Image: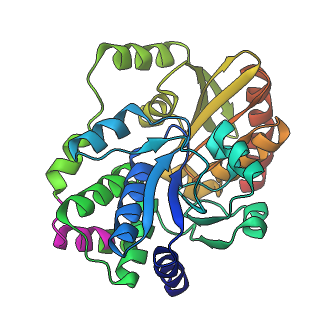
Amino acid sequence: MREAADFLIQAASSGQRIVVLCHRNADPDAVASAVVLAEAMAGLGGRVKAAAADDLAAISEAVLNSFSRKIGVNPELDFDLAIFVDTSSFGHLGEFGQKLKDSGIPFAVIDHHKPVEEMRQLAKFYYVREDITSESELIYRILTEMGVKLTPDQASLLLVGVISDTGHFRFANPDTFAVVEGLLKAGADYNRALDLLKPPDDLSRRVAMLKAAGRSELQRINGRLIVFSDLGSFEGDAAGMLVRIGADVAFVGSEEKGEFRVSGRASPEFLKETGLHLGEMMEELGKQFNGSGGGHAGAASVTGKGSFEEVKKQIVKMLQKKLVKAE
């Protein structure tokens, strides 16, 4: 932690142009981490801005608007250093990631997902803590080590990130709540954070959830309930919904023009009993299907080339192998 703090302090004082960059379709945890870290480094005299690859999730735009914050998308490659947050590989940056990789611009990784050895080898600085439940929690700890005092809005933004990425604390641990206490002491507004994370009660989302339920396909593997469904939007929300109504693990995906994307969610009990790590599974699927994947033990995603049906068959094979060993 101290090493990460020292690296960021030095970078802020170096005079370099720095972009704190998060993954495509950036979620609240990603944008909160990027914005607050960029502001903190700018407060130390750095030439720093926050950015995301490709696009932001709708809920992330709403969160940032609530705090009168903005974040750039696909910034010009005119900076001297990129700092990846909530982003474990170039693949999570989409087409922009390939452009950045080809540019040769130095980059650092500060992340809480499963480590990626290629990135460790290429990065100017690499700090990954998979045991930490959200990127916002990791950024809070590092900023505390740096001696940065958060504003109430910054603390609230990070609290939104923590709540979001822990599934409203379903995946939290004791250290998570210690960070929440620190954020509240810094002025974070807990009720405001909860209100911002309420799912939009719009017709399109309700229809999507009903479609996902109606299209669901149930398979039993060693007594476990595995559910698949296809949907063109809200895939992560739909997978989470299927777990909440009874699935041990759910995968919701779509395909278009020979490419697919799949989001997976698993219940905490299932993860504890089986040792399954969805992030590892999605990373392997990404390699098999010429794409990229990763994430947490209980929430992960993958994109690649091929059909959703092909991916489903491979997921079943992987689960059969894993669950037979777990029994």
Please provide percent x and percent y for residue 263: 58, 35
Please provide percent x and percent y for residue 6: 50, 84
Q: Nearer the viewer, residue 10 or 24?
A: 10
Q: Nearer the viewer, residue 295 or 264?
A: 295
Q: Is residue 160 left or right of residue 304?
A: left
Coloring scheme used: rainbow
Q: Is residue 131 left or right of residue 202?
A: right
Rendered view: 273 above or below 130: above
Q: Is residue 148 left or right of residue 194?
A: right
Q: Is residue 213 visible?
A: yes
Please provide percent x and percent y for residue 104: 75, 57
> Residue at 35% across / 80% down in the picture?
144
* Number of on-image labels: 0
Rendered view: 262 above or below 50: above
Q: Nearer the viewer, residue 269 or 103?
A: 103
Q: Residue 54's image quarter?
A: top right
Q: Is residue 197 visible?
A: no
Q: Is the stretch drawn in magenta largely helix, strand or loop?
A: helix
Q: Residue 196's image quarter?
A: top left
Magenta stretch: give its range.
179-188
Rendered view: 18 above or below 220: below
Residue 242 is a magenta residue: no
Q: Residue 184's image quarter?
A: bottom left
Please provide percent x and percent y for residue 45: 38, 74
